[in-house]
Amino acid sequence: MHGVLSGASPAAIGVMSVFTEAELEYLAGGQQLGRIATVGADGTPHVVPVAWIYNAARDTIDVGGHELERSKKFRDVARTGRVAIVIDDLASRDPWRPRGIEIRGRGEAIALPTPLIRIHAERIVSWGIERAPGARTVAR
């Protein structure tokens, strides 16, 4: 999996995206690695690096990986239905310019036909992508 838009943009297929145009451009910009956060059965946070894609048809972030269905993150999402992901990088080291997007929301642990974790955004926090940092709750 990689961070390239899959298929047409939401606007092109008549779907209103929860992401701003600048955020969609960032998600299409070649980022391939993110960090997904889940919560274990005992309440312990769990954060691991993952590969992801933006699914334009569903306006979601889809996470995959080797033997994903056997992983703790997959079990956590299946149990709680909650997940967050951070996708970030450095636009510049000098001057220091971090940028990224945090997406929190409802998660689906989908086993078949290809195992994946689908993230439906409910809260989006971005920095370094638009003129000012932004945080918003989105309605689905």
Image (cartoon, helix red, strand yellow):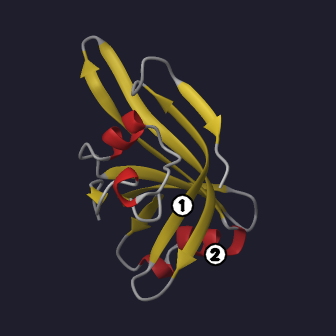
The image shows residue 69, relative to residue 102, as above or below, that is below
Residue 111 locus on image (x, y percent): 50, 84
- Image disc number at residue 89: none
Counting other residues with Cα less than 10 Å from the Cα at mark 2, is it few (<14), some (14-19), or many (20 or more)?
A: some
Indicate the secondary structure of the residue bearing disc 1: strand
The answer to whether residue 42 is left or right of residue 88 is: right
| Foreground pick, 134 / 43 | 134
Residue furthest front as drawn: 14
Label located before the other in sequence (2 or 1) = 2
| Foreground pick, 33 / 8 | 8
The image shows residue 70, relative to residue 2, as above or below, that is below
The answer to whether residue 6 is left or right of residue 78 is: left
- Name the image quarter holding the N terminus: bottom left
The answer to whether residue 115 is left or right of residue 28 is: right
Residue position for label 2: 78
Which residue is rendered at x = 76% and y = 64% of the image?
42
Indicate the secondary structure of the residue bearing disc 2: helix
Which residue is rendered at x = 34% and y = 55% of the image?
12
Which quadrant of the view contains residue 6? bottom left
Residue 84 locus on image (x, y percent): 57, 52
Which quadrant of the view contains residue 137? top right
Counting other residues with Cα less than 10 Å from the Cα at mark 1, is it few (<14), some (14-19), or many (20 or more)?
A: many
- Image disc number at residue 119: 1
Q: Nearer the viewer, mark 2 or mark 1?
A: 1
The image shows residue 8, relative to residue 129, as above or below, that is below
Residue 63 locus on image (x, y percent): 42, 64
Identity, as a three-letter code, of the amino acid under mark 1: Ile
Residue furthest right as drawn: 42
Residue 132 locus on image (x, y percent): 49, 18
Identity, as a three-letter code, of the amino acid under mark 2: Ala
